[in-house]
Image: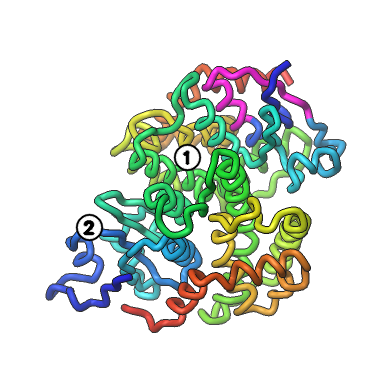
């Protein structure tokens, strides 16, 4: 893993401009603290893919500047480049990484056959459509808003807790029948849950939603202790590069 | 007796997404009606087909799947050699299609589905529209459509130069929204407007909207 921390920067050029001019290779743009960025980092680490992490300072609005908008037209992180191909949306990036680097690292991350892949796609959509909206809202309200000194919305918190509880009830049943969500092997599905679940368990007092459910708790314990995820958490703790 | 079954109804946007895909591929299927008003989708045996209690659920022989966008991907890959091509075989092009599929699933749908519910579906059942939800989501959708307007200057279809799942996934909500005040957001953006007209006119989609009309 290689990080650019400004050493190659030309006078008058931003880190972003410099990296756009630099040699090809996998590049991820964004802060590791971002849940979507950390999803991509987790995937790269599971697949043993070398990459450069280019910091984007959200507080300074770097993600809304023209150079960045060329990479990600919605002005969100992450953005991603590999061999001249520019991508965004963390789950699309993860699918690309798994296809392109199929023989690296965890080979079964995106399924080993047609049926396992169909199950992974099903649960990945369930994560994106059912788990992500309420868990993201809670992460923002409970973990980020206080740090950013923003007012919390009790109504939003309550509504999303109820939604998330229903989703976790489905997971509780599923994880009683299957070791991981899509099947008996760790997959992109479980990985995709790590960013939001990590914040809820470690940075809020709602971690019980996971740990008090027997099967979900068991699953959480297993997926969060993977080496690749531990490395992502370490990256989140490092001082910002910008 | 069709081996492919879609459990749902002709009104559900997610069920329509799957049916549009099946029609594009020319695959026969049976629509098994789920009585949502009676809460059939929240009980067994439906829950063993979709544990989230949502519509649709899908069967192809022994294979059971849920989540419309996972179902369409399964169909597009499993039947890649049938009917219209909905994916790209070139991995780099497919990666770009995948990006715009995620854009539809997260950026577009989060506003469009709420607007569809408030302005098109609720009135069908005599339920009251919430004006604040409508205003908030119109603002969000407008921003997404601005990005689409710029994208469609570089690309004939949303995912690339051919019609793919990335375009198809938009059809159900776009169709509904064209019957509401939100139509103006699409009409006022020339490339978005032209793209909508083109994809809504596809024969496979016309079959889905005809089914909705007759239910």
| Badge count | 2
User: Is residue A20 shown left or right of residue A174?
Assistant: left
Instruction: Please state the chain letter of the residue tagged with numbered disc 2 in the rendered image.
Output: A
Q: Position of residue B115 (x, y in %)?
A: 61, 43
Image quarter of the C terminus of chain B: top right
Q: Chain of mark 1?
A: B
Q: Is residue B38 above or below residue B197?
A: below
Point out residue A12 in the picture as x, y percentages from the top left corner. 14, 73
Residue A19 shown in magenta: no
Determine crowd level at label 1: few under 14, some 14-19, many 20+ residues with C-alpha closer than 10 A.
Answer: some
Label 2's element? Answer: loop
- Relative to B205, say whether A74 is above or below: below
Q: CA distance from mark 1 to mark 2?
A: 39 Å
The x and y percentages for residue A122 are: 61, 45
What residue span does the magenta drawing correspond to?
B16-33
Q: Percent position (x, y) of residue B143?
A: 44, 50
Q: For the residues carrying marks 1 and 2, which lies nearer the camera in this image?
A: 2
- Does the stretch in magenta take in B20? yes
* Quadrant showing the N terminus of chain B: top right
At a point 39% along the width and 75% down the height, the residue shown is A59
Q: Residue at x 34, y 36 (%)?
A: B90
Helix, strand or loop at disc 1? helix
Q: Is residue A210 visible?
A: yes
Residue A208 relative to residue B93: left or right: right
Q: Residues within 10 Å of mark 2 (few under 14, many from 20)?
A: few
The reply, left or right, for residue A113 in relation to residue A13 is: right
Q: Is label 1 in contact with label 2 (beta carbons under 8 Å)?
A: no
In this figure, which residue is indicated by the disc labeled 2?
Answer: A24
Residue of label 1: B185
Nearer the observer, B165 or A119: A119
């Amino acid at each position: 893993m290689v990080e650019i921390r400004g050493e190659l920067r030309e006078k008058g050029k931003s880190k972003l401009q410099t990296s756009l001019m630099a040699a090809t290779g996998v590049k991820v743009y964004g802060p590791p603290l971002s849940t979507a960025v950390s999803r991509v980092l987790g995937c790269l680490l599971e697949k043993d893919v070398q990459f450069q992490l280019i910091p984007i300072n959200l507080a300074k609005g770097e993600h809304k500047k023209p150079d960045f908008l060329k990479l990600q037209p919605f002005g969100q992180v992450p953005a991603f480049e590999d061999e001249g191909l520019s991508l965004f949306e963390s789950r699309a990036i993860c699918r690309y990484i798994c296809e392109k680097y199929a023989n690296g690292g965890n080979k079964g991350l995106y399924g080993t056959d047609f049926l396992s892949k169909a199950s992974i796609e099903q649960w990945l959509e369930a994560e994106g459509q059912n788990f992500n909206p309420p868990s993201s809202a809670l992460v923002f309200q409970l973990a980020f808003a206080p740090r950013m000194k923003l007012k919390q919305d009790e109504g939003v918190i309550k509504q999303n807790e109820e939604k998330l509880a229903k989703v976790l009830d489905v997971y509780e049943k599923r994880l009683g029948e299957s070791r991981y969500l899509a099947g008996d092997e760790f997959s992109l599905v479980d990985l995709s849950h790590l960013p939001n679940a990590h914040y809820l368990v470690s940075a809020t007092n709602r971690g019980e939603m996971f740990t008090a459910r027997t099967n979900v708790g068991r699953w959480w314990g297993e997926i969060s202790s993977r080496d690749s995820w531990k490395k992502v958490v370490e990256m989140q703790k490092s001082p910002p590069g910008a | 007796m069709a081996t492919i079954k879609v459990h749902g109804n002709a009104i559900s946007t997610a069920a329509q997404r799957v049916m549009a895909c099946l029609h594009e591929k020319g695959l026969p299927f049976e629509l098994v009606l789920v009585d949502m008003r009676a809460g059939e989708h929240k009980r067994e045996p439906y829950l063993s087909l979709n544990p989230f209690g949502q519509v649709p659920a899908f069967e192809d022989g022994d294979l059971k799947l849920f989540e419309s966008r996972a179902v369409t991907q399964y169909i597009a890959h499993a039947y890649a050699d049938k009917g219209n091509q909905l994916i790209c075989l070139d991995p780099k092009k497919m990666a770009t299609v995948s990006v715009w599929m995620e854009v539809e699933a997260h950026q577009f749908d989060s506003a469009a589905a709420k607007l569809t519910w408030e302005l098109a579906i609720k009135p069908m059942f005599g339920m009251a529209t919430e004006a604040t939800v409508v205003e908030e989501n119109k603002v969000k959708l407008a921003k997404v459509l601005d990005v689409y307007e710029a994208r469609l200057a570089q690309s004939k279809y949303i995912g690339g130069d051919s019609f793919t799942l990335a375009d198809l996934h938009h059809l159900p909500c776009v169709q509904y929204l064209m019957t509401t005040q939100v139509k103006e957001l699409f009409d006022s953006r020339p490339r978005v407007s032209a793209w909508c007209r083109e994809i809504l006119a596809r024969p496979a989609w016309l079959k889905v909207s005809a089914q909705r009309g007759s239910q």
